[in-house]
C-alpha cells in the first residue's frame, strides 16, 4: 500500500518565475489510478496552517469518498498567490480572461488590471496537465478530468471548461465573478462556445455578504443564459443564501461536487 502524499512541483510560467503546483495522491495500491481535479488557488485547497484564508480540506473530502466506496481522486492545486503574502492584484490578473469582454469595473481599478486568464489557461492545459499525467497515477481522458475554483477562480474554471470541452467533463464553478462583465458580453461568449459535447457545470453561489450578493445576481442572470442554450442535464445551480464569500462555504460545496464528479463522470 502506498500512503497518501502531497508533492510539490515548480513549473515554468510564461514571463515570470516558476509557479508552485501541489499534487495530492490518496492512499492506494500499486498500479491503482485515479481521476483528477485541477484547482485554482492551490494555496487554499489543502490543510495548510500558513494559509491566509482557511482551506477547502480537499484531501479530507477525497479520503471520505474513498472510505465510503466511491473511489478517490488526485487533486492538483495550482498556486495563484503566495500562502504567506497575499497579492490580490496578481491573482486577479491570473484569473481574469480578457476575451470574454470589456471589464465592467471602475476606471481607477480597471487601469490597475492586466487580464491574463488566457495565459493561466494555457499554463494549465499545456504545462500542468502533461506533467501531472506523466508523473502521477492519473486516469487519462476527458471523463476522468475536472476543473474547480472559487470567486475569480470560479470565473476561470468556467472559462477553461467551456474553452476545452474535449479535456474536461466537469467544472466546479463556485461564487464566480461573472459581474465584472456585461450580460451581453457573457451571452455572446457563451453562445460562441457551445458545441455538441459540453462539460457538466456545477455552479454555486451564496448571498450572505455584500460581495456574494453581487455574485448571486450575476450568477442568476448567467444561469438564465445557460437555460436558453446549454443542455439541461449538464448544468446545476446550487444556491445557499446564507453563505458568505469564504473558504468555509466552499469546503462543504466542494465535497458535493467531488461526489458528483466521482459517481457521474461517465455520464458527462
Image: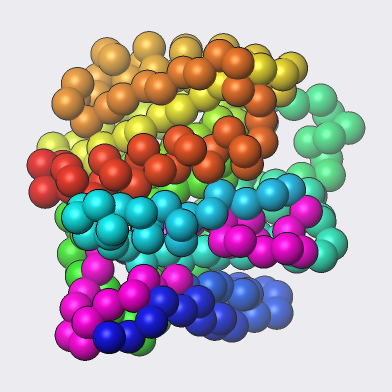
* Side (left or right) of 245 relative to 120: right
Residue 175 x, y percent position in the rendering: 55, 31
Q: Is residue 144 above or below residue 230?
A: below
Residue 195 x, y percent position in the rendering: 19, 37
State which quarter of the image contains the C terminus: top left
* Side (left or right) of 255 relative to 245: left
Q: Which residues are magenta?
A: 24-52
Q: Residue at x 57, y 61 (%)?
A: 46
- Numbered disc total: 0
Q: Is residue 31 above or below residue 193?
A: below
Of residues 29 and 157, the one nearer the viewer is: 29
Of residues 156 and 261, the one nearer the viewer is: 261
Q: Residue at x 25, y 20 (%)?
A: 229
Q: Can residue 242 be spotted in the picture?
A: yes
Q: Is residue 62 above or below residue 161?
A: below
What secondary structure prevails in the magenta region?
Answer: loop
* Side (left or right) of 135 relative to 142: right
Of residues 203 and 228, the one nearer the viewer is: 203
Q: Residue at x 51, y 81 (%)?
A: 7
Residue 93 x, y percent position in the rendering: 69, 51
Of residues 9 and 74, the one nearer the viewer is: 74
Query: Could you say which quadrant of the image residue 48 lies in?
Result: bottom right
Q: Is residue 119 magenta?
A: no
Q: Is residue 217 above or below residue 41?
A: above
* Side (left or right) of 74 relative to 31: right
Query: Could you say which quadrant of the image residue 98 lies in?
Result: top right
Q: Residue at x 69, y 49 (%)?
A: 54
Q: Can residue 98 be spotted in the picture?
A: no
Q: Residue furthest front?
A: 67
State which quarter of the image contains the N terminus: bottom left
Query: Could you say which quadrant of the image residue 80 lies in?
Result: bottom right
Residue 232 x, y percent position in the rendering: 19, 21
Amino acid at each position: 500500500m502506498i500512503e497518501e502524499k502531497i508533492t510539490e512541483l515548480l513549473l515554468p510560467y510564461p514571463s515570470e518565475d516558476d509557479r508552485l503546483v501541489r499534487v495530492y495522491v490518496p492512499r492506494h495500491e500499486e498500479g491503482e489510478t485515479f481521476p483528477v481535479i485541477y484547482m485554482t488557488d492551490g494555496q487554499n485547497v489543502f490543510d495548510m496552517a500558513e494559509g491566509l484564508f482557511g482551506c477547502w480540506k480537499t484531501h479530507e473530502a477525497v479520503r471520505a469518498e474513498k472510505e465510503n466506496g466511491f473511489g478517490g481522486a488526485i487533486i492538483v492545486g495550482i498556486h495563484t498567490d503566495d500562502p504567506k503574502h497575499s497579492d490580490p492584484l496578481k491573482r486577479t490578473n491570473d484569473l481574469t480572461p480578457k476575451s470574454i469582454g470589456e471589464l465592467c469595473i471602475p476606471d481607477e481599478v480597471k487601469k490597475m488590471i492586466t487580464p491574463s486568464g488566457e495565459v493561466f489557461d494555457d499554463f494549465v492545459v499545456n504545462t500542468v496537465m502533461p506533467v501531472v499525467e506523466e508523473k502521477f497515477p492519473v486516469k487519462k481522458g476527458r471523463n476522468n478530468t475536472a476543473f474547480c475554483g472559487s470567486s475569480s477562480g470560479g470565473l476561470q474554471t468556467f472559462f477553461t471548461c467551456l474553452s476545452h470541452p474535449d479535456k474536461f467533463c466537469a467544472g466546479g464553478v463556485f461564487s464566480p465573478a461573472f459581474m465584472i462583465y456585461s450580460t451581453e458580453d457573457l451571452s455572446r461568449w457563451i453562445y460562441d462556445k457551445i458545441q455538441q459535447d459540453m462539460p457538466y457545470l456545477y455552479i454555486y453561489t451564496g448571498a450572505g455578504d455584500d460581495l456574494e450578493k453581487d455574485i448571486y445576481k450575476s450568477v442568476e442572470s448567467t444561469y438564465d443564459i445557460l437555460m436558453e442554450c446549454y443542455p439541461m442535464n449538464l448544468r446545476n445551480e446550487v444556491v445557499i443564501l446564507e453563505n458568505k464569500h469564504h473558504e468555509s462555504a466552499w469546503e462543504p460545496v466542494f465535497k458535493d461536487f467531488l461526489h458528483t464528479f466521482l459517481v457521474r463522470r461517465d455520464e458527462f
